[in-house]
Image (spheres, rainbow, N blue to C red):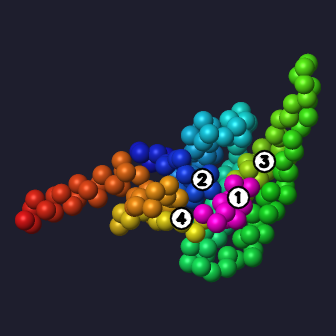
């Protein structure tokens, strides 16, 4: 992982796409994938569950392939064009490989449900990420996804406020503000 680590807190599909910052790929080994999942674990039960299994190089390759399909679809949607059918089909196939069910159990007093996926750990991971992508891509809010205004940043975000300009106020926002301050002091 980079020294600053990946940004998290955006919709899951954007967090995944943002593992490809301008400085290089943050998901180059199964351990990097595990680290990224651990950062998602406070928000998603699926991530916590997947931390208990061994992730392989094949699982990493599947996640990276999904990431490219998601990034491509987002780029097309942001440009107002149709995403490639093959990319959408790849996201659908990933979901089909590990369907989710609400498993019914009895806890001694009432019927409860537990959301579970079937399949191998890699298939469950890919299906979970593809499902998150499907939710984002079908949401009308996807049209609001923006790229960070910092000139050397490629991170995407879904602004909660229309005036948000940077992926992170503490990373890019501070860098841009410091650079502007420096220019004013040196060129005034």
- Disc 2 crowd, CA 10 A, few/some/many (<14, 14-19, 20+): some
SS at mark 1 in the image: helix
For image coordinates 49% across by 49% down, the residue present is 7
Distance between the alpha carbons at the discs numbered 3 and 1: 16 Å
Q: Nearer the viewer, mark 3 or mark 1?
A: 1
Stretch of the chain drawn in magenta: 131-141
Q: Nearer the viewer, mark 3 or mark 4?
A: 4
Q: Determine which residue is flagged by label 2.
A: 11
Residue at the extreme front: 162
- Disc 3 crowd, CA 10 A, few/some/many (<14, 14-19, 20+): many
Distance between the alpha carbons at the discs numbered 1 and 2: 9 Å
Q: Determine which residue is flagged by label 1.
A: 135
In this rendering, the answer to whether 84 lies above or below 151 is below
Nearest to N terminus: mark 2 or mark 3: 2
Q: Determine which residue is flagged by label 3.
A: 124
Nearest to N terminus: mark 3 or mark 4: 3
Horizontal and vertical percent for residue 5? 46, 45
Q: Nearer the viewer, mark 2 or mark 3?
A: 2
Left or right of 45 in this view: 185 = left
């Amino acid at each position: 992982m980079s020294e600053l680590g990946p940004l998290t807190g955006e919709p899951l599909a954007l967090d995944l796409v943002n593992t490809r910052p301008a400085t290089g790929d943050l998901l180059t080994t199964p351990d990097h994938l595990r680290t990224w999942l651990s950062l998602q674990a406070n928000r998603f039960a699926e991530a916590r569950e997947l931390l208990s299994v061994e992730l392989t190089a094949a699982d990493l390759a599947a996640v990276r392939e999904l990431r490219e399909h998601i990034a491509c679809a987002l780029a097309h949607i942001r440009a107002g064009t149709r995403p490639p059918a093959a990319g959408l089909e790849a996201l659908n196939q990933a979901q089909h490989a590990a369907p989710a069910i609400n498993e019914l159990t009895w806890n001694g007093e009432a019927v409860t449900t537990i959301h579970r996926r079937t399949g191998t750990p890699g298939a469950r991971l890919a299906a979970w990420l593809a499902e998150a992508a499907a939710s984002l891509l079908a949401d009308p809010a996807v049209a609001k996804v923006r790229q960070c205004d910092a000139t050397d940043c490629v991170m995407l975000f879904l602004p909660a406020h229309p005036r948000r300009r940077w992926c992170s106020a503490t990373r890019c926002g501070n860098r841009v503000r410091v650079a502007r301050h420096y220019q004013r002091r040196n060129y005034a």
